[in-house]
Amino acid sequence: MTVIPIQQLHQNNVLQFFKEHWGSTEMVISSGIYDCSKLDGFAYVDEQNMLLGLVTYIIRDKECEIISLDSIMEGKGIGSLLVQAVEQHAFEHDCTMITLITTNDNLQALKFYQKRGYQLVEIIQNAVEQARAYKPEIPLLGNDGIPIRDEIRLVKQSGLS
């Protein structure tokens, strides 16, 4: 099993992965509207080249923003390896911080990122309502029946572990 740049995957595999796990390749968050299939990223593949995890990101100036992260098998370290690959790449390209946005219902992501040195820096109230104006298929209820309303921005500064 290994982490590879997303560009080494067949584009159809990337498209299918996003459609299965996110409903589409489009991500609508307060920092922008992104087609994840066209972003830079890393994939975690097994010996048969089966896609088990995927992370996408963008770099603007000295800031790297993780746009999506998904792992087929929870608790196996796949997400951690993918985030480490992004962090390594970002810091090699002189980024001073890595940011990401998740929704208020995503307690798993909030736990995951905080354990890896990310800090909560901003709550963007009712951001998901605005995103639904563009992408109405975003559900009203999320994990554990929590209403999806707000976005939470997390940041990790360069050099932190």
Image: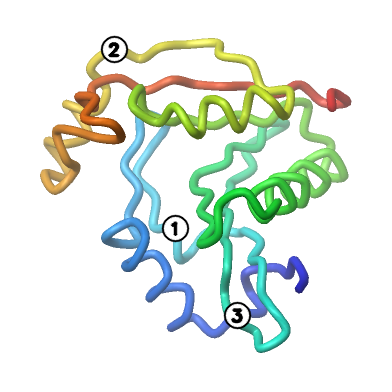
Comparing 52 with 157, the one in front is: 52
Tag 3 secondary structure: loop
Classify residue 81 as left or right of residue 106. Answer: right
**Residues at circles 2 and 3 in contact by the CB criterion of under 8 Å:** no
**Residue 86 point in image, percent of width and height:** 72, 48
Classify residue 83 as left or right of residue 33. Answer: right
Circle 2: residue type: Gln
Numbered circle sitting on residue 36: 1
Tag 2 secondary structure: loop
| Quadrant in which the N terminus appears | bottom right
Tag 1 secondary structure: helix
Give the image quarter of residue 94.
Answer: top right
Distance between the Cα atoms at labels 2 and 3? 37 Å
| Quadrant in which the C terminus appears | top right
Distance between the Cα atoms at labels 3 and 1? 14 Å
**Residue 120 point in image, percent of width and height:** 56, 14
What residue is shown at x 48% (from left), y 64% (from top)?
38
Q: How is the image coloured?
A: rainbow
Give the image quarter of residue 92.
Answer: top right
What residue is shown at x 58% (from left), y 48% (from top)?
57
Numbered circle sitting on residue 9: 3
Name the residue carrying label 2.
125
Q: Earlier in the sequence, mark 1 or mark 2?
A: 1
Q: Is residue 130 above or below residue 28?
A: above
Q: Residues within 10 Å of mark 3 (few under 14, many from 20)?
A: some
**Residue 154 point in image, percent of width and height:** 57, 22
Classify residue 135 as left or right of residue 7. Answer: left
What residue is shown at x 42% (from left), y 70% (from top)?
17
